[in-house]
Amino acid sequence: MSNPGAIVALSLLFAAPLVAQEPATEHPAVQAVPARCFLWKVTDDAGEGFVYVLGSFHSGTPDLFPLDRAIEEAYEACRILAVEIDPANVTPDESRALILRYGAYNDGTTMADHLTPEAFDVVRQKLEAEGIPLQRVGDAKPSLVQMNLRNPAIVAAGFSADFGLDRHFLTRAREDKKQILELETVESQYALIFGDSDELQELSLLRMIRKLDSIKEDTQAQLTAWRNGDADAMEQIMTGIIEKDPWMEASLKKRLDDRNGPFAEKTLALLEAGEPALVVLGAAHLVGERGVLAQLQERGLTVEQVAGQGAPAPADSDDLTR
């Protein structure tokens, strides 16, 4: 490896929690009551066993909190919290080692050997514009470079993992001594993120560079769909991505569809075990014909969207993230 130190420096940007920023918009004095939450109750034939499935955002803004009372009641009713991954299950050193294993070229090649000359020139210019010397990239794969360009842009746009729903519920579940269940592993997600073909990594990196300036707008559109409990709008956002960039269909299939089946099976297993659980998945996993909700319905389960009740006024809570 020609420059492993540079890879580790980049990996720290990717692996470390994002720093909390000021919200993109001020916290409203009174939050409107949504007709629906981005939350579904799944029950069996007898109507006795149940699990809740909540669409999540991995990075959010403070004005997502306090959460709707319906979401809070679903959490309180469950003994198990099921999440995609629990970052606490790996140490920082283990995370760095995994990034070196999956996010770097270990065969003596560098990114320049895997991108077309035209694409490499675009990436080089963007790195220079961001004040990142090309030497610091070392043996990083395009997907790792993509993550480390995107994360600061997400923070600058006002979004933070500190206000992500995953972290929120993981923190609370530990405080409340609830059982935490990982549906995947950190290693499996790294293998997924960094395992694309050269062509797909190139296309993804170039697309991200092209869309950096619209990250705030794009993310706000998804948050609006989430706030409104609008699964159709969320699905339309995903469909629109493919319409603009048809090659993204293969990427979304790998990142969404191929994982939704196992997510649905593990949700079903929780239901059959009779353990009330709150399953928290990225919001895009829930929607569409191959989404988790549709697959649960195909298995004969009753899937009902939960009506909103409204969040408590900010003054009623000392900690808005609760």
Image (cartoon, rainbow, N blue to C red):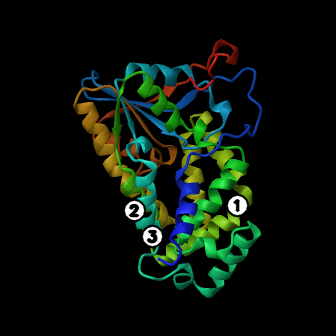
What's the residue at 34%, 24% (across, down)? 79
SS for callout 3: loop
The circle drawn on residue 191 is: 2
The numbered mark, 3 or 2, whose residue comes first in the sequence reads 2
Contact between labelled residues 2 and 3, with CB atoms less than 8 Å apart: no
The numbered mark, 2 or 1, whose residue comes first in the sequence reads 2
Q: Is residue 121 positioned above or below 285 on the image?
A: below
What's the residue at 52%, 75% (across, down)? 139
Of labels 2 and 1, the one closer to you: 2
Contact between labelled residues 1 and 2, with CB atoms less than 8 Å apart: no
Give x and y (percent) for residue 237: 60, 52
The circle drawn on residue 212 is: 1
The numbered mark, 3 or 1, whose residue comes first in the sequence reads 3
Horizontal side, residue 45 vs residue 201: left or right = left
Which of these two is toward me, 183 or 15? 15
Horizontal side, residue 167 vs residue 30: left or right = left
What's the residue at 28%, 44% (across, down)? 265
Contact between labelled residues 1 and 3, with CB atoms less than 8 Å apart: no
Which amino acid is tagged 2? Ala
